[in-house]
Amino acid sequence: TCGAPVSLTVDGGGSYLYVTCDGSQSGQQKQYLIDEFQINPPGDLSRFARIRTREAPIGIIGLMDTQSTYLNQYAYSTQSITAAEIAHWDVISNPIDLPTFKITSQGGFPRFLTGTPPWIAGTHYIYGANNSATQNVAAFSIGTGGALATLSTQTSTGNPTMPVIDSSARLLYVTNSTGNSISQYCIDSSGRHQPLSPPTISTVIAPYGITTDLMGRFV
């Protein structure tokens, strides 16, 4: 890969794997890169493209563009804490250029991202856990050309770290790595999220990664 891998995701159609790296050294200048791999039968990888970023990429998610005839068109990555950005690429038409769209995230810096599962019809949304001083969980809508806009934010505690959406796209869970808990939210039809009752569930020490099974029964 392009250095020490930090996070990875598969695109909505299961054709590509994206890997963020904390940087590779080129002479005296550190390069920030995202590697894109094609997934070949029966699952082995071959490098498809390498994306250069302006800041260190951390979390990443690949989504389908449900507003056009193209699938797997957009990839989003959070950038370094100093930049506090979500970068965006059109990975079909221009996969190796600098980001074509970026925003400064509102209400904090989302370190890791999750999004509406690709099998859900209709509008898709992105959710980020902000473990900076703001300590919240933000929801973003995806507009024309993949542009993001903040939908809602919910205050959290205990260093919200890794978000995940269940298979129905109606429940959102976020690990709180210093709070020893998982925050749980319901997602309404507009993509906005609200805390469930109770808002958190206690866990063992320092939960970090999280996922759900495809049947939506377990976290």
Image (cartoon, rainbow, N blue to C red):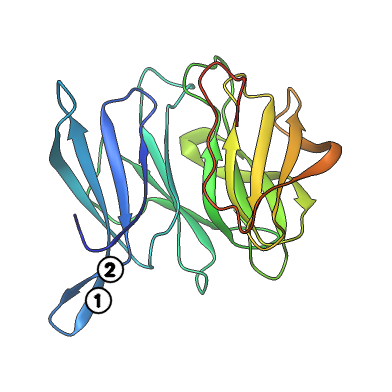
Question: Residue sitting at 67 percent across and 63 percent down?
Answer: 178
Q: CA distance from mark 2 to mark 1?
A: 6 Å
Q: Residue furthest right?
A: 197
Answer above or below: position of 184 versus 161.
above
Q: Which image quadrant is residue 8 in?
A: top left
Question: Badges 2 and 1: C-beta atoms under 8 Å apart?
Answer: yes
Instruction: Where is residue 82? Give x, y as percent.
Output: 51, 74
Position of 67 with respect to 13 (left or right) is right
Position of 202 with respect to 13 (left or right) is right
Mark 2 or mark 1: which comes first in sequence? Answer: 2
Name the quarter where the C terminus is drawn: top right
Task: For label 1, count other residues whose C-alpha is less than 10 Å away and answer few (under 14), some (14-19) or many (20+).
Answer: few
Closer-to-camera residue (114/75): 114
Q: Which image quadrant is residue 58 in?
A: bottom left
Question: Residue sitting at 26 percent across and 33 percent down?
Answer: 16
Count of numbered badges drawn on the protein: 2
* Amino acid, disc 1: Lys
Residue 13: mark in rendering: none
Closer-to-camera residue (207/142): 207
Closer-to-camera residue (138/200): 200
Q: Secondary structure at mark 2?
A: loop
Residue 23: mark in rendering: 2
Q: Secondary structure at mark 1?
A: strand
* Amino acid, disc 2: Gly
Instruction: Where is residue 41? Give x, y as percent.
Output: 14, 21
Instruction: Where is residue 14? Give x, y as percent.
Output: 31, 25
Position of 64 with respect to 193 (left or right) is left
Residue 30: mark in rendering: 1
Q: Residue furthest bottom?
A: 28
Instruction: Where is residue 140? Give x, y as percent.
Output: 63, 42
